[in-house]
Image (cartoon, rainbow, N blue to C red):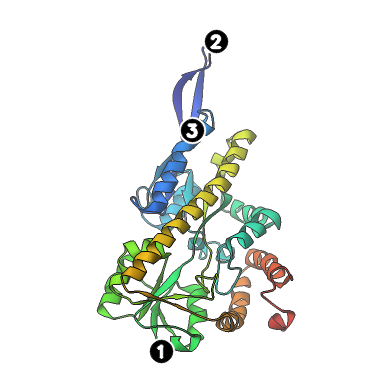
Amino acid sequence: MSTALAGVFALGTGQATAATTWKIQSVWDAGTVGYDLFEEWCNSIEKKSGGELKFRCFPAKAVAADNNALFDAVRNGVLQGMNPFTLYWSGKIPASVFLSSYPAGPDQPHQWDTMFYSLGMLEKTREIYEKFGLFYVGPIQHDSNIIHSKRPVTSLDDLKGMKIRVPGGMVAEVFQQFGVSTVSLPGSDIFPALEKGTIDAADYVGPAVNYELGFSQVTDYIMFGPPGVMSIYQPVDLMDLTVNMRAWKSLSPELQQLVEDEVRIFSQKHYLTIQARNIEAMEKFKNAGDEVTRLSQSDLEAFRKAAIPIWFKWANKDEDARAIFDMQLDYMMNETVGYVEPADVEGM
């Protein structure tokens, strides 16, 4: 853990107070709304902690060059924390595929907050991350991921034969059930691939960022789910704050509580700000001639039916993944949610 003498003296004592400084790297690029919000939040911690704790933030690739390096940098203490997309660690922590939304799973932000903060998922996640020398402070709400297409998609049948850039893993496996040829491309390659016509459609993040990336110039349609659901395959793309365990344990209980509380506050601000930007962006898409097409509720149910066996496949990768998924399945089968019926999982 990195510490820096703040040079502040307590009145009447003549003793210096040491301020703890954490270096934290985000996966947001500098200049994006995501990074601007994160930087503003980091800069607020010193005052909120009475000068005891400082967060020095860095944009994507500033210290760690890629996602694997970011994970290792926090584990090894080169960085004290990271603000990643939680799904990045599915290769290292299989359970993390269930720590952010997945095809036709829980699709509302409040459902994820409920599972984390009221149904024991936060405690289980922390137990899993501790095995890697990490402390999972908490989830940070972000946005839906959506698909921009060169041709309209008004039903799952329209997907057949299309070549679509999507995330790999579970998402790709479910889309393949509907005759989609899936391809994995880094974000920087999406625009030229759409422009050249080497792909028919592409998933990326939400409207605000996608408009800035110029997707309206190379596609004409935006595929949403039923009203109220922007995305049926990754509707709640969670980020988080994860820190080095030694750095976490070095904080006083009071500072630990401050950081936990601040993550929950920032999660709401981050999410709501991006939602407001999305509304503005959708008007821009509309003015540029783009059209929203929606899948139906029956399409969503068919997508979930195809996804359920793949949920179980990923849940069986290790005991931690199964433990997290069991919590979520119980929640989805509860009548308050009602996404899954006993008949849907019979024999699974």
Depth check: 125 or 158 in front? 158
**Separation (CA) of disc 1 from disc 2:** 76 Å
- Can you tell which mark lies on residue 161? 1
Q: Secondary structure at mark 2?
A: loop
The numbered mark at residue 12 is 2
- In the rendered image, the residue lying farthest to the top is 12
Identify the residue at horizontal 60%, vertical 71% (top origin). 105
Residue 74 screen position, x and y as percent: 48, 48
Name the spot of residue 36 as percent of width and height, x first. 39, 47
Let me know if residue 186 appears in the view: no
Closer-to-camera residue (7/141) = 141
Q: Which residue is mark 3?
A: 46
Please name the amino acid that badge 2 sits on.
Answer: Gly
Q: Are marks 3 and 1 in contact (CB under 8 Å)?
A: no
Lower sequence index among marks 3 and 1: 3
Q: Is residue 221 above or below residue 23?
A: below
Tell me the crowding category of disc 2: few under 14, some 14 to 19, or many 20 or more residues within 10 angstroms, Cα based: few
Q: Is residue 90 above or below residue 80?
A: below
